[in-house]
Amino acid sequence: MPVGYVQIPVGIAGPLLLDDREFSVPMATTEGCLVASTNRGCKAIYVSGGASSVVLRDAMTRAPVVRFGTAKRAAELKFFLEDPLNFEALSLVFNSSSRFARLQSIKCAIAGKNLYIRFSCSTGDAMGMNMVSKGVQNVMGFLHKEFPDMDVIGISGNYCSDKKPAAVNWIEGRGKSVVCEAIIKEEVVKKVLKTDVESLVELNMLKNLTGSAMAGALGGFNAHASNIVSAIFIATGQDPAQNIESSHCITMMEAVNDGKDLHVSVTMPSIEVGTVGGGTQLASQSACLNLLGVKGASKEAPGSKSRQLATIVAGAVLAGELSLMSALAAGQLVKSHMKYNRSNKDVSKASS
Ligand code: ADP
């Protein structure tokens, strides 16, 4: 029942030099500094020779909860599902739900007589929630024949885990698991980021690692990954609620090349993105995906566009981490926010 649209300003950070390609990264945000800050990080990466990324894993998950009369019966289903001899039959049933859904693994957890079954599958260029749910439904029907006393309580039993902070995503991954790195030269840290390598490494250790450990963080070993993730998600038609697990990130910083340069990396185990389906079809969001060259479904290599988008998210997070950490190290955070967020300019009139 759409009644209209809520407008959010869009800015572009970049060029982001990632894996020898240049990207102009669209970001939808009301935070004045964010695009400027990410842009500065992109510049530091660019003049240092670029960032590189690796997609470590690509699998969407769904975990129904089923109940038995006894824990013994729940355990029997667990052993059945985890037996390699049964995997082929299960994947045949699962994969029949879509041309793109391909079952990769099944992981089970028991709570008394209740069993949580986490199905992981590749989903082509779709984020994949619909696809994986259909596959799971097929398997539930199949299992009912072998285990007629199985009671399916819910197709999602929260062990998936969608849109909630959960260690299972942080440890096992959900969507795309990506690592992205760059070496920022000493003079770039000084001239572009206005700080020094030693201060950045120390701040990263005390803030992103130790500070987050003190706070009991779950996947929050970073300065502001969710800022960048949310802005790109909104611009490109992703599900903004999935920013929770998509922003899980550990930022590492280390002095390299005899302590002169900075090695920086972000490791993000659960970036949930798609370039087809959901909000990606809307006009403005399509335009943003087009800008990145990743709109739609890849016919030649299904999944390559959504994986590319995930690497861009990680690359932009790398830029964002570099810039905010530098502002903090140099004590400039409050000053820049006052300058960019307290502008008197009436942006509502800017487009008229
Ligand atoms: P989601 O599973 O993310 O909720 P949808 O089911 O809404 O996504 O959209 C995916 C649809 O796009 C499916 O119907 C699927 O068959 C179709 N499709 C076409 N090409 C591709 C592709 N390369 N990768 C994934 N899905 C594709």
Image (cartoon, helix red, strand yellow):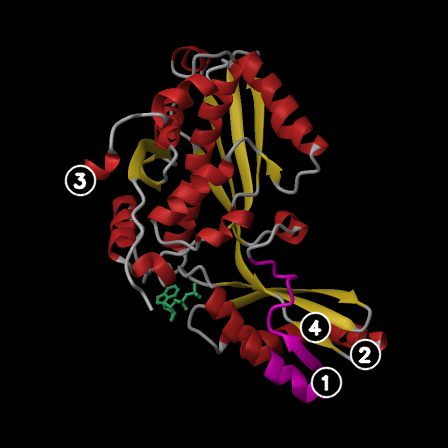
Q: Position of residue 160 (x, y in %)?
A: 61, 61
Does residue 348 show up? yes
For image coordinates 53% across by 58% down, the residue present is 59
Above or below residue 70? Residue 193 is: above
Residue 1 located left or right of residue 214: left
Mark 2 = which residue? 73
Can you tell me which quadrant of the image ligand 1 is in?
A: bottom left
User: Which marked residue is nearer to the observer: mark 1 or mark 3?
Assistant: 3
- The C terminus - image quarter: top left
Q: Which residues are magenta?
A: 140-162
Are the two marked residues, 1 and 2, in contact with CB atoms closer than 8 angstroms? Answer: yes
Residue kind at label 4, given as amino acid type: Leu
Residue 351 badge: 3
Are the two marked residues, 4 and 1, in contact with CB atoms closer than 8 angstroms? Answer: no
Kind of element beneath mark 2: helix
Residue 81 badge: 4
Task: Of the two numbered discs 1 and 2 on the same chain, state the one appearing first in sequence.
Answer: 2
